[in-house]
Image (tube, rainbow, N blue to C red):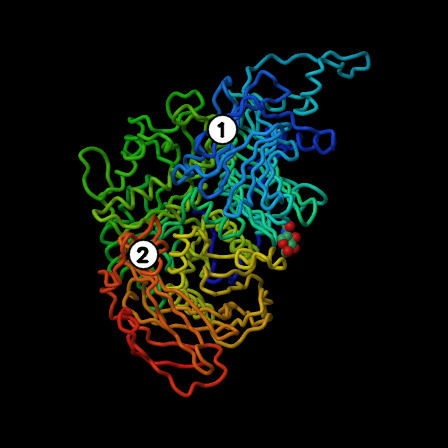
């Protein structure tokens, strides 16, 4: 919310002075974090010991228990360092070939946090009943896959888990022997190590030497840790988890958002690493972050893709605590990673691929896809900290209309709320919030209003009072009372969304009708949707600007165990509340800053408090791409990203698009209109993503997995499977761009329709947008004030013929508001161009929903589909008014329209045609 975010609505615009604003000292480096230090020291010792290093963990073969009729196996694991400590290993092979590997301490002094996966998973995965494990003398094996080409091997001594395909190692756990689950122990007084006459420590017990060889001889930050002025009390002692994951045949890795870095992840260890610190996952409010850094940002998704020209595989390491990840590339064919987490069990999902599509599908089956958002949320969002009054909102709306600039949503930041008590309007400035919203909604527009998680501890704030009385606030380390911290609202407390008692209560706060008891948001409307900011949570006087790790949540868990999941529970309960306000449930729009695996099911995210610099524009694209790798695809900030909003800091001059000087004003008007004309393409891409889990912005390796030259490309991308290729302009005074064209195919300029080459003009007003030969793009070309007003507008089809004279494309439409599409209230069509005979190009349209009911909607198969459903009837007058054919070698001598009976009304002969 303090975002300086999007300066302009295109990727290229007036940059602010390049001030370095992040206070790096507010955030830990690995060397300032006890468990990260221990994890890195472990890998350093392993490196030094070279081949004599051996993991102390082993499977006890006599303990192996193989489930009958399903692909589950359990076994006892021991560490030779601590022979009395018991560990339990479990492996399950899911129906779709994903392997889940869990390791936990058994009968330990305490219990490790084991709920991260249950928050992330959309449902309990089905265990395969057609695969079985076989226990041998040295290892356990399971072979499966349609071609029996996948094999999982659990080696007993040392413990190692390997996923192979066609005999080739894909993913190896503990191959480097860095697995270490620090067991719970009682705090013992420090033992003085005897020293000899020279002052050197004397040799103690042999086992101590073995431990020191592995764990180090110091108890480094086991029971307490200081950072700056804070002390983390660590009552449970050391409980970190170190795990190496190696991809012996994959030389590129992607994912683990959120970091401001290259899509192809730079190295953090090994010879001359790009960064000296590991990538960190610890949700944090990093104001004006660095444009290239492995530092943590607002959200964390522990998902990584490993890629080569031969295959793509993935891992989802379901951990909710702070995690650091070292990456090194021992050769250009292999990747080594080392994951160091502060607490929690080991719960790793191995996604066998072998294509990017299959990895996305496998991850989507685990954690869900991006729900189809309300259609209007793909329009332009105008935000600022802050629109200061109801009349300010009305004036801004009027100015957009006067300047013929389309916009769908006006946003209110924290200053709408009296004393930052969210839900409570400041009536001095917003005397008539419902009327104001109605004025916005009269043109089909919406409002988004911020609700942050910090509750002002005030006796006149009913939301806080109720939460306090119900005892559903996060507790301080004593476990008694309410944790108190400082945020926008001054002295504040935070709802513990891990407490089930908070769920229905929170949902009820958004009701627009009177409740029997308690506060509900009477001064609201169904046209108000919600922005959840500051949900890492951001706490101004907390360590690293967040909640102390020893704060206590429901079930007695420490904040450290679930920190990275915290923000997701807040925005997902908010999304349920927004959807549940009306009798007919409507799709909610909730924007969240913090996120975790699974957040994609309910919310959109943006790239946080960036700066209006060219560097930030450039890295923002990479960040949106990386988010998509980890499923969080409704992300962004600019016209060519799935989410399109401009925002500004309270200290900035007003800079709504209509205030800009020429030529910028006209450039932005054109850009806004371009976005609106392309909404059918975006919405169709969202529909596909909601079914398949494929990202909306697609990097090259996803489109062309075998093209090694494209693996590191992250400054251009494709939009869904539409065939649109975009190369945003992210350098000042750029006149030209070099676009990487990955294939022997014709690419056309979106605007001029000319065949394109790799170097194109790319000034501010000419963002290079290409159409891949072989694509058909549906657009709506009539400028409107807001997207709902386009509902009955006709379509234009751009038919971009491939080298062989063919093309195809899709168009998906539904009411854009409710869930009626899940009952088949939709239109989903395919357009095909082919050349059945020399000199004839035939373009036809076909009903895809009838042909592929299993892929027509998110959330399950359509059981029946009636092409004459109520929604289709509602839009039956909608026409294709224009067809533009690109790539015809000669001017056609005649154009013939043909109506095939039984095909929906929208294909009836009508309209004009033009040929390029
Ligand atoms: C990111 O990629 C660019 C282009 O390949 C490269 O020049 C740069 O060094 C990379 N950054 C890091 C931190 O490795």
Number of marks in the rendered image: 2
Q: Where the C terminus falls, by quadrant?
A: bottom left
Residue with the mark numbered 1:
66
In the image, residue 695 above or below residue 295: below
Quadrant for residue 576, please give it: top left
Q: Quadrant of residue 812?
A: bottom left
Of helix, strand and loop, which one carries label 2? Answer: helix
Q: Is residue 224 visible?
A: no
Question: Counting other residues with Cα less than 10 Å from the Cα at mark 1, is it few (<14), some (14-19), or many (20 or more)?
Answer: some
Q: Position of residue 47 (x, y in %)?
A: 72, 34
**Along the viewing direction, whichever of 62 and 594 lies nearer the viewer:** 62
Q: Is residue 657 left or right of residue 229?
A: left
Q: In the rendered image of this protein, does residue 390 appear above or below residue 545?
A: below
Q: Residues within 10 Å of mark 2 (few under 14, many from 20)?
A: many
Residue depicted at 39% across the width and 46% down the height = 601
Instruction: Locate residue 11, reporting x and y percent.
Output: 50, 61
Q: Which mark is residue 393?
A: 2
**Residue 522 pos. (x, y %):** 22, 43
In the figure, 295 relative to 727: above or below?
A: above
For marks 1 and 2, the one nearer the N-term is 1
User: Looking at mark 1, is its residue's CB closer than 8 Å to ligand 1?
Assistant: no
Assign a secondary structure to mark 1: strand
Q: Residue furthest bottom?
A: 893
Give the label, 1 or 2, closer to the camera: 1
The residue at the point 52 percent across, 31 percent down is 346
């Amino acid at each position: 919310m303090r975002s300086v975010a999007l300066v302009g609505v295109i990727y290229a615009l007036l940059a602010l002075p390049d001030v370095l604003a992040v206070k790096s000292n507010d955030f830990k480096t690995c060397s300032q974090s006890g468990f990260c230090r221990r994890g890195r020291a472990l890998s350093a010792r392993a490196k030094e010991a070279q081949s004599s290093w051996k993991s102390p963990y082993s499977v006890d073969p006599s303990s192996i228990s193989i489930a009958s009729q399903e692909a589950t196996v359990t076994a006892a694991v021991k560490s030779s360092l601590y022979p009395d400590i018991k560990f339990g290993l479990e492996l399950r092979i899911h129906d779709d070939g994903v392997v889940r590997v869990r390791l936990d301490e058994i009968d330990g002094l305490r219990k490790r946090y084991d709920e991260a996966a249950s928050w992330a998973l959309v449902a309990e995965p089905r265990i395969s009943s057609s695969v079985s494990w076989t226990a041998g003398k040295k290892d356990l094996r399971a072979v499966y896959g349609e071609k029996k080409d996948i094999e999982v091997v659990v080696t007993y001594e040392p413990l190692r888990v390997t996923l192979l395909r066609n005999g080739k190692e894909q993913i190896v756990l503990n191959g480097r022997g860095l697995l270490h689950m620090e067991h719970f122990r009682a705090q013992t007084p420090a033992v003085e190590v005897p020293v000899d006459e020279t002052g050197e420590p004397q040799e103690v017990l042999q086992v101590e030497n073995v431990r020191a060889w592995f764990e180090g001889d110091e108890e480094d930050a086991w029971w307490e840790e200081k950072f700056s002025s804070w002390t983390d009390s660590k009552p449970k002692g050391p409980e970190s988890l170190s795990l190496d994951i190696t991809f012996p045949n994959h030389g590129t890795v992607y994912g683990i958002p959120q970091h401001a870095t290259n899509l192809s992840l730079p190295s953090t260890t090994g010879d001359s690493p790009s960064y000296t610190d590991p990538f960190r996952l610890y949700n944090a409010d990093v104001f004006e972050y660095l444009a290239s850094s492995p530092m943590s940002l607002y959200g964390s998704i522990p998902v990584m893709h490993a890629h080569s020209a031969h295959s793509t595989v993935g891992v989802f390491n379901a951990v909710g605590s702070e995690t650091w990840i070292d990456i090194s590339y021992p050769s250009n064919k292999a990747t080594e990673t080392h994951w160091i987490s502060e607490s929690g069990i080991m719960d790793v999902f191995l996604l066998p691929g072998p294509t990017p599509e299959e990895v996305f599908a496998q991850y989507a089956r685990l954690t869900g896809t991006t729900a189809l958002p309300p259609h209007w949320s793909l329009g332009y969002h105008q935000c600022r900290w802050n629109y200061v009054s109801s009349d300010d909102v009305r004036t801004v709306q009027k100015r957009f209309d006067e300047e013929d600039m389309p916009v769908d949503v006006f946003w209110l930041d924290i200053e709408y709320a009296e004393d930052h008590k969210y839900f409570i309007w400041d009536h001095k400035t917003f005397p008539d919030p419902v009327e104001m919203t109605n004025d916005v909604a009269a043109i089909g527009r919406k409002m988004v209003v911020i609700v942050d998680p910090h509750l002002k501890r005030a006796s006149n704030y009913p939301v806080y009072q109720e939460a306090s009385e119900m005892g559903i606030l996060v507790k301080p380390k004593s476990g008694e009372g309410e944790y108190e911290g400082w945020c926008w609202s001054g002295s504040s407390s935070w709802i513990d969304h891990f407490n089930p008692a908070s769920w229905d209560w929170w949902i009820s706060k958004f009701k627009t009708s009177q409740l029997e008891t308690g506060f509900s948001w009477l001064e609201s409307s169904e046209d108000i949707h919600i922005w959840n900011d500051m949900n890492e949570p951001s706490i101004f006087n907390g360590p690293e600007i967040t909640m102390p790790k020893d704060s206590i949540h429901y079930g007695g868990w420490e904040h450290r165990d679930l920190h990275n999941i915290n923000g997701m529970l807040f925005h997902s309960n908010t999304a349920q509340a927004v959807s549940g306000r009306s009798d007919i449930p409507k799709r909610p729009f909730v924007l969240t800053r913090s996120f975790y695996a699974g957040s994609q099911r309910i919310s959109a995210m943006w790239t946080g408090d960036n700066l209006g610099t060219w560097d930030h524009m450039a890295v923002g694209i990479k960040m949106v791409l990386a988010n998509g790798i980890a499923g969080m695809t409704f992300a962004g900030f600019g016209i060519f990203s799935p989410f399109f909003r401009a925002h500004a800091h309270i200290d900035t001059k007003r800079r709504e698009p209509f205030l800009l000087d020429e030529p910028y004003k006209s450039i932005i008007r054109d850009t806004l209109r371009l976005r609106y004309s392309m909404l059918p393409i975006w919405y169709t891409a969202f529909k596909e993503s909601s079914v398949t889990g494929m990202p909306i912005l697609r990097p090259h390796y996803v489109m062309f997995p075998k093209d090694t030259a494209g693996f590191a490309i992250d400054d251009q991308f494709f939009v869904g499977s539409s065939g649109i290729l975009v190369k945003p302009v992210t350098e000042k005074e750029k006149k030209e761009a070099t676009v990487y064209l990955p294939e022997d195919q014709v690419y056309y300029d979106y605007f001029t329709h000319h065949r394109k080459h790799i170097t194109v003009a790319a000034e501010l007003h000419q963002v290079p947008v290409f159409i891949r030969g072989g694509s058909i793009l549906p657009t709506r070309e009539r400028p409107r004030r807001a997207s709902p007003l386009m509902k009955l507008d006709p379509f234009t089809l751009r038919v971009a013929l491939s080298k062989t004279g063919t093309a195809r494309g899709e168009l998906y439409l539904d009411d854009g508001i409710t869930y009626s599409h899940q009952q088949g209230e939709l239109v989903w069509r395919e357009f095909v161009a082919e050349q059945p005979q020399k000199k004839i190009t035939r373009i036809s349209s076909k009903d895809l929903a009838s042909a592929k009911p299993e892929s027509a909607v998110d959330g399950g198969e359509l059981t029946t589909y009636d092409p004459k459903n109520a929604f289709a009837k509602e839009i039956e007058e909608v026409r294709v008014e224009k067809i533009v054919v690109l790539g015809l070698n000669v001017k056609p001598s005649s154009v013939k329209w043909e109506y095939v009976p039984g095909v929906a009304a929208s294909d009836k002969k009508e309209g004009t045609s033009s040929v390029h």
